[in-house]
Image (spheres, rainbow, N blue to C red):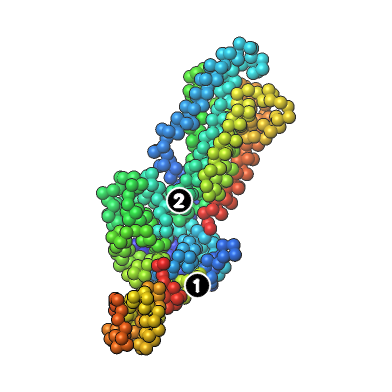
């Protein structure tokens, strides 16, 4: 065993290395996919049923003007699509990352191979991207069965939902890998995720919020995701607004990736 | 990035596989590794022996290219670990101090994932996994989850995993720490076979028997520095005597006995909390001399010198405390 029997696995590009880490997550996912479907697809569908159909019939009786002339179900669905993507993004980037560096130490195992910390990071982001595509597509398929989607243009909201999820996943992963304890994740869920979910335009237009707090909503990636998903699915999107939303989400994602390249390196190369 | 197959040629047969000069690792104001020099040739079994905190693991992590040196030179397989980390790591096998297995996956899946990290084709991994699992005696557990396996089995799986890329150098950081004696012997046996097969081994340990059994050459580390280096035999010859007489007295007489023992000719005397050690060429002769002085120890033991004695001599402390 003293001489390599075949060409060593180098050189290989960034994407090749990241794809190897992606394969790890896919193998891992074969074990956990059932539970993940429940929390990331069924959960938003429950909201769609309770709010969209149940509460929606009451809302619709008061007229549809405030919702841009569509039923509450149709109004709500793209918002939930974006909000569900946020939840998937946050969920995938907290405990799975922390567990890999702290509990199982599979990240440490990966960087003993040719993979670099940034490959480990990017590989996981690729996996999160796949999860987002899968969840969003499933959600849309079921929402269509509910009659909650009006036009085929709604398909353009899917990549926006994925980007919304990544705008959360990238920076939160960058931060999660630096943690020594998992206690701060509960704080994120309680004081970050839930208020965002409720007040970023998912359930009602943020014009209903007091004017002084609206700028806070404009700063959150979720509002941009909700606003663009909704505009695309209702056919009200304009180019300038869309570019602002996509640009904002892409910038947050890119900043998260740049930050994560540093934090992963610092945590795994000590 | 250059590397791969062709770079074996970077290392002529005679030049060292690993070469360190003034290698240093600092964490803030703490210096874990303080300017050490060593060289390692192909086919050697090389050990870092020292107590916890001596800087062994930090050294191993630098060799494993997952810890950039703070100062000094380090060359591995003729390459620079800072710039050629992936190329070097593709030719290393690593058995870390703590297991880093994915306990939710099966034994074979762990090998598959790890083999894929090295870009090995599935068929190659399958063939090697079968061979390696047989080697570490885990074939009958190959489709079981890792979680319920014993500590010794996990260690053996980690060793199998580290060999999936047929590494030129195998790094083992305290390979048997935390294992029960029987499991340790199984691991030693496997490592000894690897050594016989010509795999270059680098290991850290704070067990003197492990160092003596497995290592052709050792460096004794203490406080981040190398205190001595050589083969176990050379170190014992240089820093200890052929035999050691261990004496245990009634605690009440321990101190007076220690004073009186100055009358027995010995190269060196170590007064430990519970025992007194006399370093002598002939233990039985020395014991007779002790009795002539009218001292009657509760127990006496004549034994050969070990690395423990070398360590005690070099640092004034015991190794396994």
Q: Which of A215 and B80 is in front in this view?
A: A215
Residue A142: x, y in percent?
48, 23
| Residue at disc 1, secondary structure | strand
| Residue at disc 2, secondary structure | loop
Residue reaching furthest to the front:
B252
Q: Do labels 1 and 2 share a chain?
A: no
Residue sitting at 58 percent across and 13 percent down?
Answer: A58
Residue carrying label 2: A105
What's the chain of the residue with tag 1?
B
Q: Nearer the viewer, residue B229 or A179?
A: A179
Residue reaching furthest to the top:
A61
Marking on residue B225: 1
Residue B150: x, y in percent?
32, 52
Is A270 drawn above or below residue B317 in the view shown? above
Residue sitting at 27 percent across and 51 percent down?
Answer: B139
Is B120 drawn above or below residue B193 in the view shown? above
Quadrant of residue A51 within the rendered picture: top right
């Amino acid at each position: 065993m003293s001489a390599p029997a075949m060409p060593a696995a180098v050189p290989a590009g960034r994407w090749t290395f990241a794809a190897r880490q992606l394969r790890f997550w896919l193998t891992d996912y074969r074990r956990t996919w059932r539970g993940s479907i429940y929390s990331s697809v069924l959960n938003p569908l429950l909201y769609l049923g309770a709010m969209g159909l149940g509460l929606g019939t009451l809302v619709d009786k008061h007229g549809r003007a405030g919702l841009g002339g569509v039923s509450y179900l149709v109004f709500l669905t793209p918002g939930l699509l974006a909000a569900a993507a946020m939840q998937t993004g946050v969920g995938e980037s907290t405990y799975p990352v922390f567990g890999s560096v702290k509990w199982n130490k599979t990240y440490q195992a990966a960087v003993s191979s040719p993979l670099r910390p940034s490959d480990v990071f990017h590989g996981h982001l690729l996996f999160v991207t796949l999860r987002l595509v899968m969840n969003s597509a499933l959600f849309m398929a079921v929402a269509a069965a509910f009659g909650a989607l009006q036009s085929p243009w709604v398909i353009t909201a899917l990549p926006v939902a994925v980007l919304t999820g990544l705008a959360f996943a990238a920076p939160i992963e960058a931060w999660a890998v630096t943690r020594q304890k998992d206690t701060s994740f509960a704080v994120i869920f309680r004081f970050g995720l839930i208020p965002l979910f409720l007040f970023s335009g998912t359930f009602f237009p943020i014009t209903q919020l007091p004017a002084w707090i609206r700028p806070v909503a404009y700063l959150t990636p979720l509002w941009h995701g909700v606003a663009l998903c909704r505009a695309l699915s209702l056919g009200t999107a304009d180019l300038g607004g869309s570019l602002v939303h996509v640009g904002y989400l892409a910038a947050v994602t890119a900043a998260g990736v740049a930050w994560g390249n540093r934090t992963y390196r610092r945590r795994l190369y000590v | 990035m250059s590397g791969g197959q062709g770079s074996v040629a970077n290392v002529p047969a005679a030049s060292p596989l690993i070469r360190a000069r003034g290698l240093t690792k600092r964490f803030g104001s703490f210096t874990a590794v303080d300017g050490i020099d060593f060289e390692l040739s192909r086919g050697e079994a090389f050990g870092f022996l020292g107590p916890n905190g001596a800087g062994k693991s930090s050294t191993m992590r630098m060799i494993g290219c997952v810890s950039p040196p703070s100062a000094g030179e380090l060359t591995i397989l003729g390459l620079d670990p800072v710039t050629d980390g992936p190329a070097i790591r593709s030719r290393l096998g690593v058995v870390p101090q703590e297991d880093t297995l994915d306990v939710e996956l099966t034994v074979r899946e762990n090998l598959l994932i790890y083999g894929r990290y090295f870009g090995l084709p599935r068929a190659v991994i399958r063939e090697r996994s079968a061979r390696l699992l047989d080697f570490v005696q885990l074939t009958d557990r190959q489709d079981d989850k890792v979680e319920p396996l014993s500590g010794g089995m996990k260690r053996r799986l980690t060793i199998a995993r580290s060999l999936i890329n047929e590494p030129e150098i195998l790094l083992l950081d305290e390979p048997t720490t935390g294992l029960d004696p029987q499991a340790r012997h199984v691991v030693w046996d496997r490592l000894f076979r690897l050594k016989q097969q010509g795999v270059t081994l680098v290991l850290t340990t704070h067990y003197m028997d492990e160092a003596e059994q497995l290592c052709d050459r050792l460096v004794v580390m203490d406080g981040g520095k190398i205190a001595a280096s050589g083969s176990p035999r050379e170190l014992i010859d240089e820093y200890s005597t052929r035999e050691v007489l261990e004496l245990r007295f009634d605690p009440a007489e321990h101190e007076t006995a220690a004073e009186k023992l100055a009358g027995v000719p010995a190269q060196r005397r170590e007064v430990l909390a519970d025992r007194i050690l006399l370093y002598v060429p002939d233990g039985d002769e020395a014991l007779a001399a002790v009795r002539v002085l009218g001292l009657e120890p509760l127990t006496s033991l004549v034994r050969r010198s070990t690395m423990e004695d070398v360590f005690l001599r070099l640092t004034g402390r015991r190794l396994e405390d």
